[in-house]
Image (tube, helix red, strand yellow):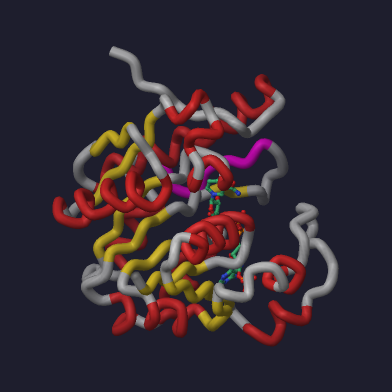
Amino acid sequence: MNIGVLGTGIVGRTISAHLAGGGHSVVIGTRDVAHTLAQSAPDAMGTPPFSAWHGSHAQVRLGTFAEAAAHGDVLINATVGHASLNALAAAGGDALAGKVLLDIANPLDFSHGMPPSLFVCNTDSLAEQIQRAFPALKVVKTLNIVTASVMVNPSLVAGGDHHMLLCGNDAGAREAVAGYLRDWFGWQHVLDLGDLSAARGMEMMLPVWLRLWGALQTPMFGYKIAR
Ligand SMILES: NC(=O)c1ccc[n+]([C@@H]2O[C@H](COP(=O)([O-])OP(=O)(O)OC[C@H]3O[C@@H](n4cnc5c(N)ncnc54)[C@H](OP(=O)(O)O)[C@@H]3O)[C@@H](O)[C@H]2O)c1
């Protein structure tokens, strides 16, 4: 399948590498291709420069957000939450129309220091903001509640015996994404929470996730829903 991944951070790289390794045709999108390729030092979070990663993942093509979106039959939003609307606007409405978007972004606000707060919550969500801004897009919120390596390899935690959540307004898109989670990444347990307003809760799981990370001293965990 042709897949457009918006975002060149750890999430975009991890998803792109996994999908390309599985035989998919992947274009990973960035604001400025030349600028991204020119970076030669790790960023403030210690993430290695894109070119260092790309050297060993040359099958993933780097393009602009618009080129990645035009390439993808399915799109993945792995941009920083505060810029997701800008990145999708740069992708262009025509390239988005009618497509399924797996929205992984979290609305984290680091402007007041650590731990981050959420810049939208309770009565709205980033996923709903995206859906309102791009009504022809089929937004499905998912994968935002685990760290990048677990997204593409849930068996790294408890042999895969934990849950992934999803939600979205289009039932067909939710069903398609449940299949992608299973077939692309190996998720055994996917819970469909219904319409996109469930993204409020999924995004509000991040403050809990961050405290768990601190308490467990590792990001290698997931949520298992027992009943
Ligand atoms: N890291 C994780 O394990 C994890 C887990 C769950 C969810 N998430 C969420 O997944 C998303 C991606 O996380 P990440 O850590 O991989 O990367 P990130 O650093 O949060 O985002 C990197 C991407 O955001 C783009 N970006 C930054 N500022 C921008 C702006 N002003 N306008 C347009 N685009 C802009 C960058 O564009 P350039 O390519 O041009 O630099 C880059 O592609 C985030 O929303 C994060 O909260 C992350």
Closer to us: 65 or 119: 65
- Tell me residue 40's x, y (percent): 83, 73
Res. 101 in view: yes
Kindly identify the residue that appears in the image at 44 percent across and 66 percent down: 23
Q: Residue at x 77, y 81 (%)?
A: 38
Whole-percent x and y of residue 83? 53, 65
Quadrant that contains the C terminus: top left
Image quadrant, ligand 1? bottom right
193 sits left or right of 142 in the view: left
Residue closest to the far bottom: 34
Is residue 60 shown above or below 67? above
Q: Which residues are magenta?
A: 115-121
Magenta stretch, main secondary structure, is: loop
Residue 124 is at least partly visible in this image: no
Q: Position of residue 121 (x, y in %)?
A: 42, 42
Q: Quadrant of the N terminus?
A: bottom left
The percent coordinates of residue 181 (x first, y second) are 35, 47
Above-or-below relation of 146 to 134:
above
Residue found at the far left of this picture: 171
Is 119 part of what is drawn in magenta? yes
* 153 w.r.t. 205: above or below: below
Q: Is residue 203 left or right of residue 97?
A: right
Residue sitting at 72 percent across and 80 percent down?
37
Front position in the image: 173 or 108: 173
Q: Quadrant of residue 99?
A: bottom left
* Residue 188 painted magenta: no
